[in-house]
Image: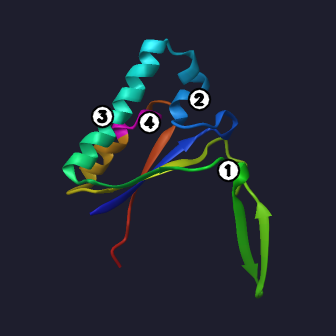
Amino acid sequence: MKYLLLIHSNPKTWGHPSFLHTEEGIALPRAARDALAKQLDDLLTELDTSGELVSASPLEAPAKGKVVRVREGVRATTDGPYSEAKEQLAGVFIVDVASPARAEEIAARIPEAEFSAVEVRLISAD
């Protein structure tokens, strides 16, 4: 089963990996920041080695995005961000795993889960 893991972060502190650019991340001692970076690297290596990692990609800042809407056949394109929410989509993982529990386990190991949120969504096979 393929899952999309959506990593959320605050656009005011944009940078990748986003957990190192949050106020909480910046306030951590260097050793803790290094441990989180290693945690992410180790997770990516594990998922790649196991074949569970399909893709992992950071996204540009929401302000650099575009929003496209079509109303009554007329396209309107505006500069981002799409919403004024405190947190915006910062990056995505696509994993191919045996169960929803495994997808949740992986999401919990992504360091951003400690500072904001990682959303887990099944990619529909329909």
Q: Which mark is residue 62?
A: 1
Rendered residue at 66%/40% (across/down): 11
Q: Which residue is mark 2?
A: 21
Element assignment for label 4 = helix
Q: What whole-number distance in Å separates the C-alpha atoms at marks 1 and 3?
A: 28 Å
Label 2, secondary structure: give it.
Answer: loop
Identify the residue position indicated by label 4 in the image. 113
Q: Mark 1–mark 2 contact, CB under 8 Å?
A: no
Q: Is residue 13 visible?
A: yes
Q: Dividing the picture into quarters, in which one does residue 118 lie?
A: top left
Residue type, numbered disc 2: His
Q: Which residues are magenta?
A: 108-112
Discs 1, 3 touching: Cβ within 8 Å: no
Q: Is residue 111 magenta?
A: yes
Which of label 1 and label 3 is nearer to you? 3
64 or 111: which is nearer to us? Answer: 64
Q: Amino acid at mark 3?
A: Asp
**For mark 3, what is the residue?**
42
Q: Are marks 4 and 1 in contact (CB under 8 Å)?
A: no
Distance from disc 4 to disc 1, alpha carbons, whole Å, reads 19 Å
